[in-house]
Image (spheres, helix red, strand yellow):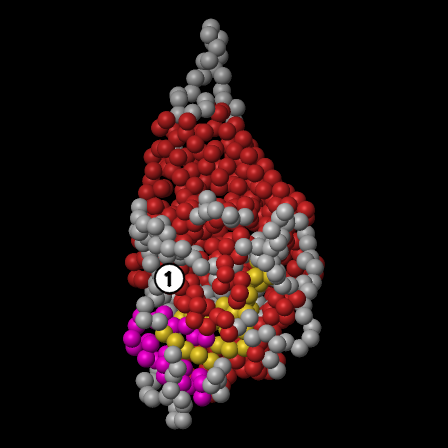
């Protein structure tokens, strides 16, 4: 007789619709990759098939699969409108805590966001059901002292005594995941739910209340992930990322939700968890060996989602939930630094692929995360192999038939090469073009400045993302190679605020990319001159990388890349702005906290 599952959990049965969606997505991606593989084999076999042709075809297969997977995800998102999730409609009684882990952050900006969210919650009439816990892992003593001072200011301004708490750990064991685990062990039993944020997160009080209502209506739901959108971007790079995340991401998230079903994603922040489920299921192991593959798990969010699913809890992403915001790096260098940590964390998941009891889809998600960083290495290896291929190709035999006096010229394979190039470009561009068409059809472009402005922004984003893609390819490739050779990137603090870079700083961070671009062009000119025109879109951005990095880090003219929150700020953003106007004159002081403030409580 089957053992009954604990109350509140689900059976783990995967619906037929989800299985069919997964089968179509995987099948379409494999078919596209196989098509690219065959097309390149035919192209390479024109002058005699050799080992380099087979190697390059295999690299095309792996790289094309990843591109096709992204395209299929977008198409799936465009083809569906998810059902309205169930929600509890009566009076709320559940107690929730909003967790804000901080690590060497500016306390004025971080606590200002908390003050805004606390005010937003009070406007819902449910503020008394939500506590805030600021979980500091700050190592810098000067910043820690400011945290204590501004915590007192926060208490005084919000009347948060008994509802807003601050504590700083002596040792940051386990980093962010360990910080949250420490709170749950000490205080988790006092709450039904925990809203997990990042230091740069901002969320409407109404959104938090709605998340609790949806959790209450689904007893088997262990984690509910919102789709955070980027706000407050100022630089060209930041505003491009802000537009792309706001305009494209809801469609991709919807497609992802269709495929993942009950085994959904966790992105580490702007989500709500059932405290009992998280406490019972999500204690993370410390991997044997030294970093980067051993030690604490860096990309803990994917693993926690997998552990919840293994224990029988639903993990879901609701892309219809608005009012969930975050900030992002303002330049390519800061983005690459953060991406380095994600790369190490995702490659670390190779140690967990065979962990006992995990759902098959969770293992596949780990593979996707690994492939996201290995795919650029495949593309770079393909370029290198293509440049070197003429050195190993057999000489062309123009007289293959004995006693035949006329030369046999090889058939031109230009059409196959063009077909392969068009296919790759199509996989990159087509999903975004379909998204803008869908947005015009459904009227969603109104929040992005109208149809014309949305089309202009999309075309500009496609152009700029194509130009900067080789730079990201090089940074990601270097990150993978660093991890493979055993270099631990650690957990550097996030860089917030103005991200403007001068040419000198950009050169210092990317001179090796310039050298790589020059070497690529020189090698192609020497060994395979016919490839030079094909390589220019990749090599030229590498050669001018410092100029691109510096230019995109600075504010640009307005007009393009408008988003709904720029046209009309969200209510919680207005509350945050009001707090910062009050606090800004004192933001750089080291004075004592306001008179009458109570002592900080650990």
In the rendered image of this protein, does residue 414 appear above or below residue 331? Answer: above
Q: Quadrant of residue 262?
A: bottom right
Q: Position of residue 244 (x, y in %)?
A: 54, 60
Q: Which residues are magenta?
A: 133-156
In the rendered image, residue 140 lying in the magenta stretch gets the answer yes
Main SS class of the magenta portion in the image = helix
- The answer to whether any part of residue 88 appears in the image is yes
Which residue is drawn at the image coordinates 41% and 67% (left, top)?
182
In the rendered image of this protein, does residue 259 appear above or below residue 400? Answer: below
Q: Judge from the rendering whether residue 468 lies leftward or rightward of residue 444; answer left or right.
A: left
Which residue is drawn at the image coordinates 54% and 77% (left, top)?
130
Q: Quadrant of residue 519?
A: top left
User: Which residue is most to the front?
Assistant: 1
Total labels drawn: 1
How many residues crowd mark 1 within 10 Å: few (<14), some (14–19), many (20+)? some
Q: Position of residue 594 (x, y in %)?
A: 39, 91
- What secondary structure is marked by label 1? loop
Which residue is drawn at the image coordinates 30% and 72% (left, top)?
140
Q: Judge from the rendering whether residue 278 lies leftward or rightward of residue 476; answer left or right.
A: right
In the rendered image of this protein, does residue 312 appear above or below residue 187? Answer: above
User: Which residue is most to the top?
Assistant: 403
Q: Position of residue 578 (x, y in %)?
A: 50, 83
């Amino acid at each position: 007789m089957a053992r009954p599952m604990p109350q509140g959990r689900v059976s783990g049965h995967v619906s037929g619709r989800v299985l069919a969606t997964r089968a179509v997505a995987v099948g379409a991606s494999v078919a596209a990759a196989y098509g690219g593989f065959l097309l390149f084999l035919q192209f390479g076999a024109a002058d005699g098939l050799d080992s380099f042709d087979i190697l390059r075809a295999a690299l095309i297969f792996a790289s094309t699969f990843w591109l096709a997977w992204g395209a299929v995800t977008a198409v799936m998102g465009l083809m569906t409108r998810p059902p309205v999730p169930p929600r509890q409609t009566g009076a709320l009684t559940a107690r929730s805590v909003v967790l804000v882990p901080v690590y060497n952050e500016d306390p004025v900006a971080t606590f200002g966001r908390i003050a805004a969210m606390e005010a937003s919650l009070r406007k819902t009439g449910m503020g008394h059901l939500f506590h805030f816990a600021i979980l500091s892992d700050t190592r810098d003593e000067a910043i820690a002292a400011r945290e204590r001072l501004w915590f007192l200011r926060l208490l005084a301004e919000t009347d948060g005594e008994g509802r807003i708490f601050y504590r700083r750990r002596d040792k940051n064991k386990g980093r962010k995941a360990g910080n949250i685990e420490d709170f749950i062990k000490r205080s988790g039993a006092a709450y039904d739910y925990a809203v997990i944020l990042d230091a740069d997160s901002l969320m409407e009080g109404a959104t938090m209340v709605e998340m609790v209502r949806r959790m209450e209506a689904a007893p088997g739901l262990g984690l509910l992930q919102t789709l955070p959108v980027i706000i407050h971007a100022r630089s060209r790079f930041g505003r491009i990322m802000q537009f792309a995340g706001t305009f494209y991401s809801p469609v991709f998230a919807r497609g992802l939700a269709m495929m993942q079903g009950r085994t959904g994603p966790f992105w580490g922040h702007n989500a709500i968890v059932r405290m009992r489920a998280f406490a019972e299921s999500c204690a993370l192991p410390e991997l044997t060996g030294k970093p980067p593959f051993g030690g604490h798990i860096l990309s803990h969010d994917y693993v926690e989602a997998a552990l919840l699913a293994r224990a029988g809890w639903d993990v879901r992403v609701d892309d219809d939930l608005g009012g969930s915001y975050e900030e992002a790096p303002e330049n390519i260098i800061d983005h690459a630094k953060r991406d380095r940590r994600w790369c190490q964390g995702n490659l670390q998941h190779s140690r967990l692929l065979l962990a006992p009891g995990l759902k098959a889809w969770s293992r596949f998600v780990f593979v996707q995360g690994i492939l996201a960083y290995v795919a650029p290495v495949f593309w770079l290896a393909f370029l290198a192999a293509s440049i070197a291929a003429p050195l190993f190709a057999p000489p062309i035999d123009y007289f293959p038939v004995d006693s035949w006096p006329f030369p046999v010229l090889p058939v031109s394979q230009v059409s196959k090469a063009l077909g392969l190039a068009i296919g790759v470009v199509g996989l990159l561009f087509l999903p975004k073009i379909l998204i803008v068409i869908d947005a015009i059809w459904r009227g969603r472009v109104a929040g992005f400045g109208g149809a014309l402005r949305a089309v202009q922004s999309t075309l500009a984003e496609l152009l700029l993302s194509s130009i900067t893609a080789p730079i990201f390819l090089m940074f990601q490739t270097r990150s993978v190679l660093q991890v493979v050779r055993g270099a631990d990137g650690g957990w550097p603090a996030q860089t917030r605020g103005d991200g403007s870079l001068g040419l000198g700083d950009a050169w210092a961070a990317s001179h090796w990319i310039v050298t790589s671009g020059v070497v690529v062009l020189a090698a192609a000119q020497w060994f395979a001159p016919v490839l030079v025109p094909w390589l220019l879109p990749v090599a030229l951005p590498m050669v001018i990388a410092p100029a691109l990095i510096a230019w995109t880090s600075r504010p640009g003219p307005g007009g393009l890349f408008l988003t709904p929150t720029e046209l009309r700020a969200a209510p919680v953003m207005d509350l945050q702005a009001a707090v910062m106007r009050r606090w800004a004159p004192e933001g750089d002081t080291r004075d004592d906290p306001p008179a009458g403030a109570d002592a900080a409580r650990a």
